Amino acid sequence: MESLEDRKERVVRVTRKLRKALPDARCKLTFQTPFELLVKTILSAQCTDERVNRVAMDLFKKYPGAKDFAKASQDDLEKDIQSTGLFRNKARHIRACASFLIEQFGGVVPPSMDELIRFPGVGRKTANVILGNVFGIPAIVVDTHVMRLSKLLGLTLQDNPEKIEYDLMKILPKKDWISFSHLLSDHGRQTCIARRPQCRRCSVEKDCPSSLVS
């Protein structure tokens, strides 16, 4: 059985190899302000980042800031974001978040996990996206790719995103927390694809206990 120290050494190797293979790995949601990224992260649930970026171009022209979203009608906002899916809940959360941001924080997105998860519809994943990509605060975003690949790589046995996050925090150097999420997400999209993993061209195949290469 692999020891904790051995797992720490292996995840450092995995990170180094993925960084070499994916030098442009980064947050795919483009943003100009912290609030814009907050809205886009809410929209990204069960939707591709590419579609969110497209939809948001017109969205932020119509609603430039938090006050505009707070004043938007539920019906109008639903229509504006319908193509992202789950639009009723997303519209409700975005409007509530905008109002909460103005009322509680004067319109300034706070750089704190404890404060961010107080926002309607915001959990640890969304909060970590904001903390890492806006404020540069070490944070591990556990999306579907990170969940799946962390298990395939033998870095966790958990199914719960929060438990996976804590397992990764135990073995990853803090300086790699932000980039590791981007690396696994890109690797999951490009190489370790769920239905057809490309193990023979995988940069971390030798460090992966789930490799299909004999």
Image (tube, rainbow, N blue to C red):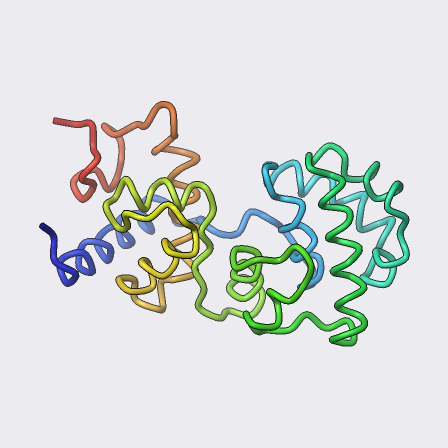
Q: Position of residue 164 (x, y in %)?
A: 36, 53
* Image point (80%, 55%), residue name: 95
In this view, which residue lies farthest toward the top?
A: 196
* Quadrant of image for the C terminus: top left
In the visual, does 7 lie left or right of 95? left
Q: Position of residue 160 (x, y in %)?
A: 41, 49
* Image point (29%, 53%), residue name: 15
Q: Quadrant of residue 139?
A: bottom left
In the visual, does 139 lie left or right of 95? left
In this view, which residue lies farthest toward the left?
A: 1
Q: Position of residue 12 (x, y in %)?
A: 24, 58
Q: Quadrant of residue 202?
A: top left
In the visual, does 147 lie left or right of 81? left
Q: Quadrant of residue 191?
A: top left
- Report how many numbered discs are placed on residues in the image: 0
Q: Residue 12 or 74: which is nearer the viewer?
A: 74
* Image point (18%, 56%), residue name: 7
* Image point (41%, 34%), residue name: 190
Q: Residue 118 or 105: which is nearer the viewer?
A: 118
Q: Identify whether 58 is placed above or below 201.
A: below
